[in-house]
Amino acid sequence: MINCRKATRLLSRAADAELPWIERALLRLHLAACDACTRFSQQLQFVRAALARYRE
Amino acid sequence: MDATQFVNELDGHRRYLLRVAELQLRDPDLAEDVVQETIVAALTARGSFTGKSSLKTWITGILKHKIVDAIRQKQRQPVSVGSFEEELDLDDIDALFKDNGGWEAKPSDWGDPESALSRREFFDVMTFCLEKLPPNTARVFMMREILELETGEICKELAITANNLWVILYRARMSLRECLEQNWFAQQAR
């Protein structure tokens, strides 16, 4: 299992490159059990969407 | 579109171009030069503007190249080569987590964040937060998220490893999220 710190690192990396399948699986497993990181993941996506808007 | 109209429309995007260049280059004079060059280049290449994309998208594309050129030249001047070393240390970000890797303080509920996107003040806070990032981190993050360069290009351009790039982008995203939470969402919740 991975912890939250590791999960946030993987989530950031996933925004730049496709993760290896094992890390993708570990991340999915973690997110399924962790509300805080699920929320973090959504917030990260929101920040990226906001940056896209900022760009325009 | 005739020449005068074209110039007027270009001029209408000047402020936006300047803001992007300033955030990216952290040097108002250089940003001014780059925007000037961009506008000249756009006028010269006017014939190749087909109108398929918006003028803003088209001219931002030209600006990207000019910024990358400017960064490349900056890198060659030894004085201004910022060392990435100190910005690769994640101690401050790791402090957001406990020793066992759990959250020290969990991300708070942002309510309906989408509604912030229609608020001008939100983007002011965003600018504030971007400006608060350490200089090299900001530059790299803007290359990635505003100029939309591929990670490979950024690594090549700045001569850094993919791992260093990931660390820098991670730090930028964590800081930005934290800053938006403190300076926008926490304020909204009051």
Image (cartoon, coloured by chain):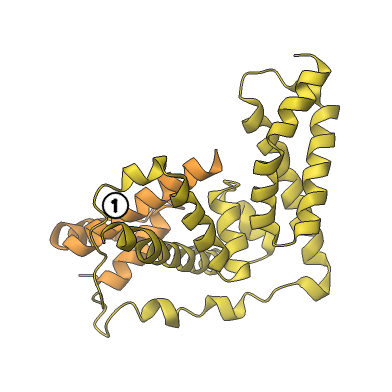
Chain colours: A orange, B yellow
**Callout 1: 10 Å neighbours few (<14), some, many (20+)?**
few
Instruction: Say if B174 sits above or below A51 in the image.
Output: below
Report whether B22 appears left or right of A29: right
Q: Position of residue A30 (x, y in %)?
A: 20, 62
Q: Position of residue B14 (x, y in %)?
A: 72, 39
Q: Residue at x 44, y 62 (%)?
A: B176
Instruction: Say if B6 sits above or below B20 in the image.
Output: above
Instruction: Say if A56 sits above or below B160 in the image.
Output: above
Q: Position of residue B139 (x, y in %)?
A: 62, 61
Q: Position of residue B125 (x, y in %)?
A: 47, 57
Residue, far front: B190
Question: Which residue type carries mark 1?
Answer: Gln
Q: Quadrant of residue B5?
A: top right
Quadrant showing the N terminus of chain B: top right
> Which residue lies under the disc numbered 1?
A42
Look at the image and tell me whether residue B151 can be seen: no
Q: Quadrant of residue A55?
A: top right
Look at the image and tell me whether residue B109 can be seen: yes
Q: Secondary structure at mark 1?
A: helix
